Image (spheres, rainbow, N blue to C red):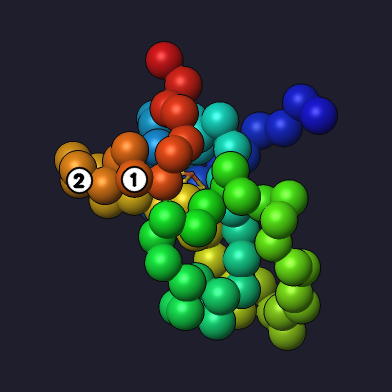
Amino acid sequence: MNQHIHCIINNCHYWVNGNKCSANEILVASDEFGDNRSDAIDATMAQQLTPTSAQSCMATCCKTFVPKGSNQKTSDGITKMA
Ligand code: SF4
């Protein structure tokens, strides 16, 4: 798939000008999943995770979000594109 992920969260490590996400992969999850699982559970584990439903877009989140400048940027195991 040739995907383009657009995002307006400009304090995320992966956000770049033009409102784009530069992460190689991201994990979108339900808010409940995001609230209850550790930051270590992220896109690299996607194939092992059980799919869930959401009632609306307001009940979903990007679990790959990492605050810009944070030392958390390597804790999710995602490789940032050069
Ligand atoms: S990782 Fe998520 S929050 Fe961060 S820029 Fe990409 S889509 Fe946005």
Nearer-the-camera pick, 80 or 15: 80
Residue 36 percent location from the top left of the image? 47, 79
Task: Tell me which amino acid carries mark 1.
Answer: Ser
Dot 1: within a 10 Å radius of its alpha carbon, few (fewer than 14), some, or many (20 or more) residues? few
Give the residue displayed 67% in from the left and 51% down from the top: 46
| Residue topped by disc 1 | 75
Helix, strand or loop for disc 2: loop
Give the residue displayed 52% in from the left and 53% down from the top: 42
Helix, strand or loop for disc 1: loop
Residue 70 is labelled as 2
Task: Tell me which amino acid carries mark 2.
Answer: Ser
Total labels drawn? 2
Give the residue displayed 56% in from the left and 75% down from the top: 33
Residue 60 percent location from the top left of the image? 60, 71
The answer to whether residue 60 is seen in the rendering is yes
Rendered-image quadrant of the C terminus? top left
Nearer-the-camera pick, 76 or 10: 76
Residue 19 percent location from the top left of the image? 47, 38
